[in-house]
Amino acid sequence: MLKEALDYAHQNHERFLNELKDFLTIPSISTDPEHKQDMQRGAEWLAGQLREIGMENVQILPTAGHPVVYGDWLHAGKMAPTVMVYGHYDVQPPDPLELWQTPPFEAEVRGDNLYARGSADMKGQVMASLKAVESIMKNGGLPVNIKWLIEGEEEIGSQHLDEFIKDHTELLKCDFCLNTDAGIIAADKPAITTGLRGLAYYELKVYGPAKDLHSGLYGGIIHNPAQALAELIAGMHDKKGRITLPGFYDNVRKLSKKDRKEFARLPLKKKTYLEQTGAPGLWGEPDFTPPERLGARPTLEVNGLLSGFTGPGSKTVLPAWAMAKISCRLVPDQTPKETTKQLVKYLKTHAPKDIRWELTFIHGAGAALVSSDSAAVMALSEAFKAVWGTEPYFRREGGSIGVVVQLQQRLGVDSVLSGFALEDCDAHSPNEKLHLPTWDRGIDTLIHFFYKLA
Amino acid sequence: MLKEALDYAHQNHERFLNELKDFLTIPSISTDPEHKQDMQRGAEWLAGQLREIGMENVQILPTAGHPVVYGDWLHAGKMAPTVMVYGHYDVQPPDPLELWQTPPFEAEVRGDNLYARGSADMKGQVMASLKAVESIMKNGGLPVNIKWLIEGEEEIGSQHLDEFIKDHTELLKCDFCLNTDAGIIAADKPAITTGLRGLAYYELKVYGPAKDLHSGLYGGIIHNPAQALAELIAGMHDKKGRITLPGFYDNVRKLSKKDRKEFARLPLKKKTYLEQTGAPGLWGEPDFTPPERLGARPTLEVNGLLSGFTGPGSKTVLPAWAMAKISCRLVPDQTPKETTKQLVKYLKTHAPKDIRWELTFIHGAGAALVSSDSAAVMALSEAFKAVWGTEPYFRREGGSIGVVVQLQQRLGVDSVLSGFALEDCDAHSPNEKLHLPTWDRGIDTLIHFFYKLA
C-alpha cells in the first residue's frame, strides 16, 4: 500500500503540479479588502479539491473575517489516531510588484523552482498534504482519521481563528495537528520545529501641524512629526540592540543549557545568514548567537515608514504626520497584551508634548513551544529519515503561527511543525519560490508519515 | 496718469481674475518629469501675456532644465531706472490630492479666496505685476524701463537659473529686482522682506538586506534599515533642538542688538504660529524667539520618509531599504557646499557598519540679506502706505529664494522683496489660496510703486 501510494504520487506528478499552479493564480490576499472575492474563490477551489480526493462533510465555514475550509474522513476506526491537517489559503501582498521577474499570480517554473506568491507560504504545502492523502486514499484508504482546517487569515494574524476554534471544539477534536507552515532549513537539511515566536503588530502615527506646512515658513518652530517619530523609534533600542520598552524582558523565559546546546547543533553559521540576506553585516544582542536570537529572543521591528513627500525630486514640506508599522516577535512567556502596555508606557514617557501620537494594535499571538518526543513527532522524524536518508534537525524558529498557540489553549493539542519550504524561499518577498524537488520529497514524506502513524 | 491707471485696473478686475484662473489651470509642476509639456505651455502662455501688454523682445529662452520667459520695454529714457521684475511660473506638486476640497488645477473662488495650486505661490503674484504694468502701459506708458525674468524652476531650487544669469548678464543688466515671491504677514499687515534663508536639499537612503525579508525569519539578526535611518535622523538634533552636524553653526552670523530689536517689533506671537499651524505646541532652540528662529537660525527638516509596507493592515516585512528627504534652511554665512560636507561627516561618523548609506544632494542656494534703505525699498514702502494707510513691517523670512542670491552674486543687484500672499495662504499645502482683496490692493500698490520710482 505504501509502495502503491508512492508510485501513484510519482505517476501523477505533472497533474499535481498543474493543480498547484491553478491554485496559485488566485490572488487570495487576506489583508487587502479589494481581494475579498478572491478569498472566497480560494476557499471554494480548496473545498472542491477536498471533495475530489474523497473527503466528506466538506464545508466553507464563515468567521467574522475570511472563511475556514473544513473537511474530514473518519473511517479508520476508533483505535486509530485523529490527525488535524492545518493550512492557510491566504497569501501576503506581492508588493513591491516591480521587483518580480514574472507576475506574482502567474506561476512559472524556472529551473528547479516554481515562482509565485504563496508557492512556498503555503499553497505548495497545502497541496503536498492534499496530494499525499489523495495518493493514500486511491490506494487502500487512510490508516488514520483526518480533519482539515484550512484558514484564510494566517497572514493577518489568524484574527478570527481563535473564536472559530472556540465555537467548534467538538468538530475539531483531534489527537494532534500537522502544520506544514514551518519549513525546513535546506534541501538536504530536513527539520522539525519545536518552538515559534509570537507577534504583536502595531501602527504608530505621530501628528504635528494640522496640515503639511512650507518648511521654510515654519521650519525651526515646529517639532517635525517625521523627526519626532524617528526619535521615538530610535529610543526603542539601546546601543547593544536591546529593546528599551519598560519591562519588555521581564517574562522572557531564560535559555537552559540544554536549549543552548540544541541551538549550537544547528547548521546555521553567520555566513549562512549573510548569504541568505545579502546584508552588509549581522546585528543584535551580543550575548546570544544568531540562531538563539531568531528562535528564543524577542524583537521590535520597523515594518514600514511613511511621511511627507516621497516622490522623485524635492518638495519643501514640513509634514503634518508620520506613520510607522512596528511589530514585536514574542517568545515564551511574553503576551501581546503586555507588549501593548509596555509600548504605550514607553510612548507616554518619551513622546514630547509638542506632538500627538496614536497607537493602533493590529493583531497578535503568543509564542509556542511544542513537545519534541511525541509519537507524532517521532513518526515524522522517521518519515524524513526514510525519504531523505538523514535525521531531521530540531529547532526553534523566528516566525509566528497563531494557530499553534490557539490549538494548545482551546483543544489542548500540540502541533507537529515542519514543511517543505526552504529558508531561501523568499516568503513575503518578491519572487517567492517553491523548490520542486523538495516538494516532491515532501509528498513522499507525508505518505510515509501517515502510514507510520497507524 | 496714476488715477487713470488705478481706474483701469479696477474696471478690468473681472478680466484680470479670469486670466489668472486660466493661468492656474496649467499644471506646471517643475519637479515632475511627466509635466514637461505643461511647463512649456506655462511659458508660452506667459510670453503671450507679455506681448499683449506691450512688452517687446519677448522670448522663451532655453536652460538645461525648464525655460525662462523674458521680455522688456526700455523706452523710459536713460535717466529712468531699469527694474527687473522676477517671477516663476512653476508650482509645487499638489499631493496629497485627497485633501483638496476642489481640484488643485481648477481655480475656484470661495468667499474672499481663490483656491488653486500656485494661486499664492506665485502665479497670482506674477499676474499682479503683469496687470499693474498693463494698467500703466494703457494709460500713458511706464515711467521706468522694465525687464521680465520669469523662471520655471523656483520650486526645484532654481537649478539652472544661475547658469542662465551668468550667460545673459548684458540682457539682464538692471538697477534692482522686484521680487513678489516673499509675501506679507496678514491682510492688514504689509511687509517688506530684507532677509531670506538658503536651502540645501538631500535624499538619504539606507540599505540593509538585499531584498525585503520575513521579519519573523530574520528579525533580531539584521539591523533594520528603517530603524537605522530613524537612529541617524534622531541623532541629527540634540534635546534642545540644536543641530548636531559637526561645525554646523560655525559660520552662522550672530544676531546684533539691532537685529533682535527689529525681530521683537514684528506682530508675531506664539499664539499666531499656533493658530497658523494647528500644531500642539511650538518647538526649537530655546535661546531664540520664534521669529528669530524662522528668520535668522538654520534648520534641518525631514521632508519625507518611506520604507517597507505602508498600506492598510499589516505585512511582516523587514525592509531592504529606507529613504528620507532631508533639507536644511541656511542663514548667512552658511553655504550648501559646507552643509553637504557636514552631513557626510556626520553620516561617516554615526552610520553603523551593518548598513550602507547613500546621500544625494538635490539642490541648494545660500541665504540672502538685502539693504533696507535703498530708493526702491523706500518707493515700495511709500506705495504700501498709500494703499494700506500703514507702514509696512521689515522682516527676515524663513523661506528661500535662490534668485536673490544669484542676482547679488552675478549682477551685483539687490532685490526688493514683498508680495501679496498671506502667511496662511497654504503655499505648498493642499487648498492653497490667494486672498483676492489683498491681490487687488497688490495691483494698486505696484501701480503706485512704479510711479514712485520715476
Image (cartoon, coloured by chain):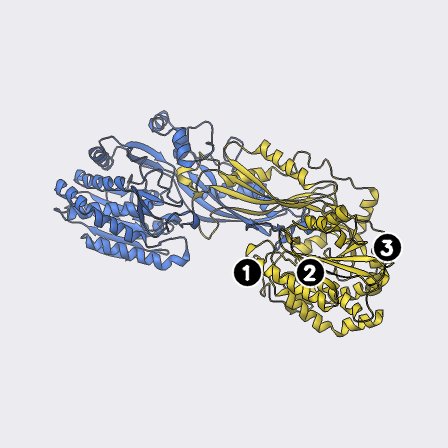
Chain colours: A yellow, B blue
Q: Say if B19 sits above or below B371 in the image.
A: below
Chain letter for mark 1, please. Answer: A
Q: Check disc 2 and report the residue beneath it.
A: A59
Q: Is residue B411 left or right of residue A169?
A: left
Q: Are marks 2 and 1 in contact (CB under 8 Å)?
A: no
Please rate how many residues cluster around mark 2, counting C-alpha atoms within 10 Å: few if below 14, some from 14 to 19, many from 20.
some
Please rate how many residues cluster around mark 3, counting C-alpha atoms within 10 Å: few if below 14, some from 14 to 19, many from 20.
few
Of residue A203 and residue B236, the one placed in the foreground of this image is A203
Amino acid at dot 2: Gln
Label 2's element? strand
- Mark 3 vs mark 2, foreground winner is 2
Tell me the quarter of the image containing the C terminus of chain A. Answer: bottom right
Q: Is residue A451 left or right of residue A107?
A: right
Of residue A39 and residue B54, the one placed in the foreground of this image is A39
Q: Position of residue B338 (x, y in %)?
A: 46, 41
Cα distance between the residues tagged 1 and 3: 46 Å
